[in-house]
Image (tube, helix red, strand yellow):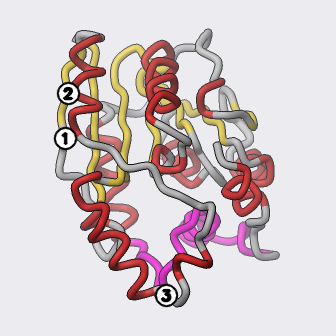
Amino acid sequence: MGNKWKEIWNRRKPVTGELDGDWEHVYLELKRLNGYDVMEGGVPLDSFLNFHAGLVELLDLTPGKSVYEVGCGAGANMYLMQREGMIVGGSDYAEGLIETAHAVVPNAREMGAMEAADIPTEEKYDAVYSCGVFSYFPDHDYATRVLERMLAKSRHAIGITELHDRTKRQDYLAFRRANIPNYDERYEGLGRLFFRREFFEDFAREHDLRLVFPNLEMANYWNTPFIFTCFMYRK
């Protein structure tokens, strides 16, 4: 993935003392590290938790099941899922974020710094998912390679959230330009990859998977009008 984005993510470090205290405080700091502080005000805890509950349900997870996250960032999702009794693993290309994830999820089955297209597939999980990462991929061929690795690693479910909708690209850019001064200059070389639903329909058909586009939305999240979610299941 793009070096400029990687440099940005590697600069994100926890505030001293913010990974101490109650789990809600730690969880919100991990979400901040994962980029949910871009727009003023951020996202409230209830919105994160409601989204998380929907994610767990769509992945068919219950205590004791295993789940792997592609692009886990600082480990916010793994942190909460492990608290709920799931066996977790994950990876991210930003070594700095993985250091934080190791600190808050020391008992992960697998964890390492690597490209999404390089995740190992020998260890299998009940579900494999990725939240908000696909838009950072360089192109759709790379996204296909990642999906193939996710499928090889999953025994049942695959989930991809926060996919930037190609049909809403102009609306997204207009919103960003209206809310971020000098947006084009500040984000030069920091592109986003947009997807059409047909991309995932084709992949599901080619691999004989059941496909759904659930209405899994995060309330009070500025990105919500411009994204969609995709889940696939082995038949």
Q: Nearer the viewer, residue 193 or 116?
A: 193
Mark 3 is surrounded, within 10 Å at the Cα level, by few (under 14), some (14 to 19) or many (20 or more) other residues, namely few
In this picture, is 204 found above or below 11? Answer: above
Secondary structure found at label 2: strand
Quarter of the C terminus within the rendering: top left
Where residue 56 sits in the image (x, y, percent)?
34, 42
Q: Residues under labels 3 and 1: Cα distance?
A: 29 Å
Q: Which residue corresponds to mark 1?
A: 213
Label 1, label 2: how many angstroms apart (C-alpha)? 7 Å
Distance of mark 3 from mark 2, alpha carbons?
35 Å
Q: Which residue is mark 2?
A: 211
The reply, left or right, for residue 6 in relation to residue 223 is: right
Q: Residue 130: x and y, percent? A: 46, 40
Q: Residue at x 58, y 50 (%)?
A: 79
Q: Secondary structure at mark 1?
A: loop
**Residue 67: percent from left, percent from top:** 48, 30
Horizontal side of residue 161 vs 213, given as left or right? right
- Residues shaded magenta: 17-45
Residue that numbered label 3 is attached to: 40
Q: Are marks 1 and 2 in contact (CB under 8 Å)?
A: yes
Q: Give the mark nearest the N terminus, 3 or 2.
A: 3
Mark sitting earlier along the chain (3/1)? 3
Mark 3 near mark 1, Cβ–Cβ under 8 Å?
no
